[in-house]
Amino acid sequence: MIIFYDGNCPLCSTEMQQLKHADNKNLITLEDLNASDFSERYPYIDKDKAMNYLQAQKQSGEMIYGLDVTYEAWKIVGKHSWLKILRLPIIRFFADCGYLLFAKYRHPISRFLMPNTQCSNGQCGLKVKGDK
């Protein structure tokens, strides 16, 4: 599975780093949408749409989106099996609405929850005093 994510989002990058750490069999490839050569390597991915809504490509070539990506990715690495509750019919609707809200405001949410974190090239770390 290839996951296309916003490497400049501290929450997004942190989750992707945790996911990759759990990926002992190297089944997931992470692709930062902000990479300078992203559009050349993945011309079939609409970067603007991908910035608004998490996207992944399964090995079969099928594209999946939003919380389906999160669920499938953690399922692949054998972690967080509780996420399947988010894919149950009635809960799925509300979870997907919540995800859309999160995705739209992920940067302000990240700044609020992780005020001392700064991301660059998909890697996040603590801000150095004096950085903006």
Image (spheres, rainbow, N blue to C red):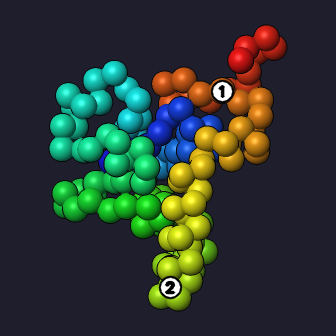
Q: Residue at x 47, y 39 (%)?
A: 6
Q: Residue furthest right?
A: 129
Q: Name the side, left or right, on which 47 lies relative to 22.
A: left
The C terminus - image quarter = top right
Residue 13 visible to an observer of this rendering: yes
Q: Nearer the viewer, residue 52 or 2?
A: 52
Expressed as whole percent of the image width and height from the top left, the position of residue 121 reads 49, 24
**Label 2: which secondary element:** loop
Whether residue 128 sits left or right of residue 34 in the image: it is right
Tell me which numbered mark, 2 or 1, is placed earlier along the sequence: 2
Can residue 22 be seen here? The reply is: no
Q: Nearer the viewer, residue 118 or 85?
A: 118
Q: Residue furthest top?
A: 130
Q: Is residue 93 left or right of residue 47?
A: right
Amino acid type at image mark 1: Gln
Indicate the position of residue 48 as horizontal and vertical percent values.
35, 42
For residue 94, above or below residue 21? below
Q: Which mark is residue 118?
A: 1
Which residue is drawn at the image coordinates 28% and 54% (left, top)? Answer: 57
Q: Which residue is mark 2?
A: 88
- Residue 24 lies, in percent from the top left, at 47, 48
- At label 2, the amino acid type is Leu
Q: Residue at x 42, y 44 (%)?
A: 51
Residue, x 32% and y 40% (percent of image)?
47
Distance of mark 2 from mark 1, alpha carbons? 35 Å
- Observer-nearest of 29 and 100: 100
Mark 2–mark 1 CB contact (< 8 Å): no
